[in-house]
Image (cartoon, rainbow, N blue to C red):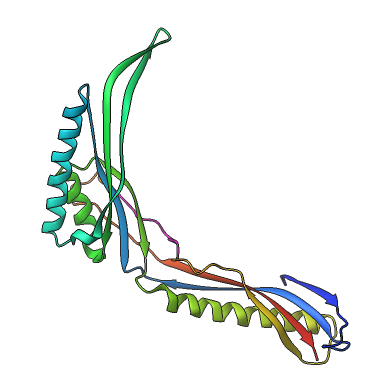
Amino acid sequence: MVNGLYNGYRGNDTGNGKKITVSGEGSVFAAPNRATATVGVRTENQNLQIAQAENAEKSNAMLASLQKLGIAKDDIKTADFRIDPIYTYEDGKQIFQGYRVTHLYSITIRNLAQAGLIIDTAVENGANEIMNIQFSVAEPQELYNRALSMAVIDSYNKAQTVARTLGIQTPISPLSITEETQKGAPGPFLVASLDTSGGGGTPIEPGKLEIKATVTGTYISL
């Protein structure tokens, strides 16, 4: 299906040429070579100081175990730290139960072969919060440029199809190409597979990443 808009166009700079506006898309799939996992420690106690001390002790043990695996300090950052009061409700009354202390860390994993081991090690050493795992590529710009090139070619091919369908015999030339996709890090195409039910360690399946680019191209018949 051709996704395009055909308009008659007249102007001093283009004469009696006809203007065709179409969208173009390009996608590149790549194996990720980096991951970011959010792991942390949650503790609860009626006494806030005890909850904080337990959280700090378990967090330090978890971080030390990850550093022994080769995770650099620069690849470990606090993602969230919060203290929440805990309440229950009985007969419409709010009853204070204590405090919950949560400390989450963002862990950059540069060796994906270690991903499952890193998760297991964190859990074995005190982590009880595993939020998510996001995969990425270390240098996404080259892949994005390939997708962008494919998107431009796609828009030109669509414009040619529109021109032929409408019986335009003269060649077409690009008048403007507008990039629609922001140059951000690619998002995950397949998410991680986490299965802690077995005894053989947590399997991490990174799948593939899809890097997309979209353009809007306007072409003029000569």
Whether residue 26 sits left or right of residue 49 in the image: it is right
Residue 163 falls in which quadrant of the image? bottom right
- Residue at 36% from the left image edge and 61% from the top image edge: 135
Say if 136 sits above or below 39 in the image.
below
Q: Does the magenta segment cover residue 116?
A: no
Residue span colored magenta: 186-194
- Residue at 15% from the left image edge and 34% from the top image edge: 53
Quarter of the figure with the N terminus: bottom right
Q: Position of residue 67 (x, y in %)?
A: 14, 57
Residue 170 falls in which quadrant of the image? bottom right
Whether residue 213 sits left or right of residue 47 in the image: it is right
What secondary structure characterizes most of the magenta part? loop
- Mark count: 0
Q: Does the magenta segment cover residue 193?
A: yes
Residue 48 falls in which quadrant of the image? top left
- Residue at 28% from the left image edge and 18% from the top image edge: 97
Say if 92 sits above or below 156 in the image.
above
Q: Position of residue 201 (x, y in %)?
A: 20, 52
Quarter of the figure with the C terminus: bottom right
Q: Position of residue 167 (x, y in %)?
A: 85, 85
Q: Position of residue 57 (x, y in %)?
A: 13, 39
Say if 81 sits above or below 106 in the image.
above
